[in-house]
């Protein structure tokens, strides 16, 4: 990928949010070689910046760390009928899975790169600079990815006899992603055992070993739906009676995990630093605590969960026990858009604790910035010297002190994003 030279200069705005705990009014950042050179009060940055650095002013705007959408499937489109009318999400989660399987089997190869480009443009329009992406079928789409991305090569295979073949395919995908990374340093590889009901124990152990050997993070869809919980408990329910028969697979031999999810993941070698667990709706609080103690990080996708009727993640427990979590939109087939702002608002509506609005909104903003970057094992999420110059410039909602973050989360959407910058290069907006 050949990127244009990154802008070197100073961005000045009415406010700078360097991170959730540090704001400056007015503020500025100096950018050089794709990284933050200086960040802080406007006067300090202008005084310390190299002589001759150009300056661009954004009065009435706020400079924010770029948002992190920590769980996406950017090649999955909005599903629509022949007339282009969006299809309703099926009432049954198993029916939804079958829809995705049918899409993968029938999608025109040429459509995948178009889906990806469209989704990337939408992500950038919300001020998103970083994503956690489950790799789609078309790996070459990622060659020119303008977002900072952790792209997880996905493995699916429940029966023991398919484990070796799937492991080889994942290895090939990782090699391809690492080759892409050599030409596009925004892209980083990872490994995704899809789910515990589509990845059997032998493959799970093999993928965990591969991730450890290659020092790559992992991403697992976990505890997303009631059918998943039922199947993992005793091998029954819709996944056994409808999903697997529909794809011609026999799982009658499976009788459940036989232990708790934290114990199972630990025994498989997956529960370690670098493990990213997505959804986490049907986990008990002790299970969440045990998974965190084992090194896992979490992504919550409240709008996708609600759309499928799968329930809601325990936002209150995550916030009140100070367990860091990231936020993700999931695919455009599950959510109406790729807006982390809407995801923050949805998570806030689920909170039932006593934390005041200002403190809660700060935590939700952290989830969509610094916690998201940390969950993906990527730099960014804050605007400090040495960090990537990944940021968004948005309308300043006004308000000082405790009033700012509630106003930011209440008022900000796509229409308020003026510029999105990735690695020092304007990627969307008037200057892009």
Image (cartoon, rainbow, N blue to C red):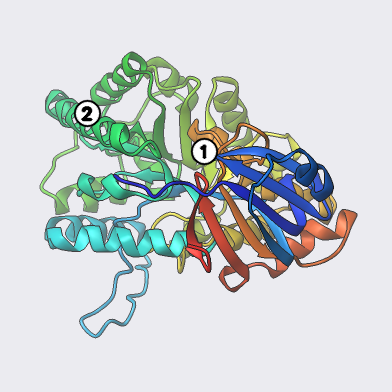
Give the answer, above or below, for where 216 lies relative to 419. Answer: above
Question: Image point 52% across, 49% down: which residue?
Answer: 7
Q: Which mark is residue 33?
A: 1
The answer to whether any part of residue 309 appears in the image is no
Residue 27: percent from the left, percent from the top?
Answer: 78, 51
Residue 193: percent from the left, percent from the top?
Answer: 32, 33
Residue nearest the viewer, comparing 10 with 126: 10
Question: Image point 60% across, 35% down: which residue?
Answer: 387
Say whether residue 259 is left or right of residue 159. Answer: right
Are the residues flagged by discs 1 and 2 in contact, CB closer than 8 Å?
A: no
- Label 1: few (<14), some or many (≥20) within 10 Å? some
Residue 339: percent from the left, percent from the top?
Answer: 53, 62
Residue 3: percent from the left, percent from the top?
Answer: 36, 47
Residue nearest the viewer, comparing 116 with 362: 116
Which mark sits nearer the N-terminus, 1 or 2? 1
Where on the picture, by quarter, is residue 317?
A: top right
Question: Tag 1, which secondary structure?
Answer: loop
Say whether residue 279 is left or right of residue 364. Answer: left
Q: Which mark is residue 396?
A: none
Question: Image point 63% across, 56% down: which residue?
Answer: 344
Where on the picture, by quarter, is residue 139?
A: top left
Question: Tag 2, which secondary structure?
Answer: helix
């Amino acid at each position: 990928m050949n990127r244009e030279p990154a802008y070197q200069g100073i961005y000045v705005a009415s406010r700078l949010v360097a991170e959730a705990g540090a704001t400056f009014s007015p503020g500025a950042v100096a950018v050089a070689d794709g990284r933050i050179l200086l960040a802080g009060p406007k006067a300090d940055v202008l005084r310390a910046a190299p002589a001759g650095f150009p300056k661009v002013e954004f009065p009435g705007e706020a400079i924010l760390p770029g948002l992190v959408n920590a769980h996406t499937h950017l090649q999955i489109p909005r599903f629509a009928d022949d007339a282009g009318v969006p299809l309703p999400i099926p009432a049954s989660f198993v029916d939804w899975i079958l829809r995705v399987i049918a899409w993968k089997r029938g999608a025109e190869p040429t459509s995948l790169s178009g889906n990806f480009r469209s989704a990337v443009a939408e992500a950038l329009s919300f001020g998103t600079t970083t994503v956690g992406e489950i790799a789609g079928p078309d790996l070459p789409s990622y060659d020119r990815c303008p977002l900072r991305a952790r792209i997880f090569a996905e493995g699916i295979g429940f029966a023991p006899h398919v484990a070796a073949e799937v492991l080889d395919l994942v290895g090939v995908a990782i090699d391809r992603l690492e080759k892409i990374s050599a030409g596009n340093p925004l892209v980083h590889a990872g490994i995704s055992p899809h789910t515990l009901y589509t990845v059997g124990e032998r493959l799970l152990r093999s993928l965990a070993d591969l991730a450890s050997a290659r020092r790559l993070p992992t991403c697992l869809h976990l505890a997303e739906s009631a059918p998943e919980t039922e199947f993992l408990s005793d091998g029954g329910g819709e996944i056994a009676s409808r999903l697997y028969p529909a794809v011609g697979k026999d799982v009658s031999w499976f009788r459940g995990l036989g232990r708790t999810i934290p114990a199972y993941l630990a025994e498989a070698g997956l529960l370690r630093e670098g493990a990213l667990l997505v959804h986490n709706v049907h986990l008990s609080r002790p299970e969440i605590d045990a998974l965190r103690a084992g090194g896992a990080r979490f992504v919550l996708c409240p709008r996708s969960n609600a759309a499928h009727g799968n329930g809601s993640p325990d936002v209150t427990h995550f916030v009140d026990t100070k367990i860091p979590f990231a936020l993700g939109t999931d695919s455009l087939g599950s959510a109406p858009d790729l807006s982390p702002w809407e995801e923050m608002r949805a998570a806030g509506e689920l909170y039932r604790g006593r934390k005041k609005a200002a403190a809660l909104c700060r935590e939700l903003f952290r989830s969509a910035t610094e916690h998201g970057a940390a969950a993906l094992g990527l730099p960014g999420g804050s605007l400090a010297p040495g960090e990537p110059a990944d940021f968004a410039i948005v309308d300043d909602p006004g308000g000082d002190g405790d009033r700012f973050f509630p106003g930011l989360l209440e008022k900000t959407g796509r229409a308020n994003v003026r510029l999105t910058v990735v690695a020092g290069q304007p990627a969307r907006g008037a200057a892009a």
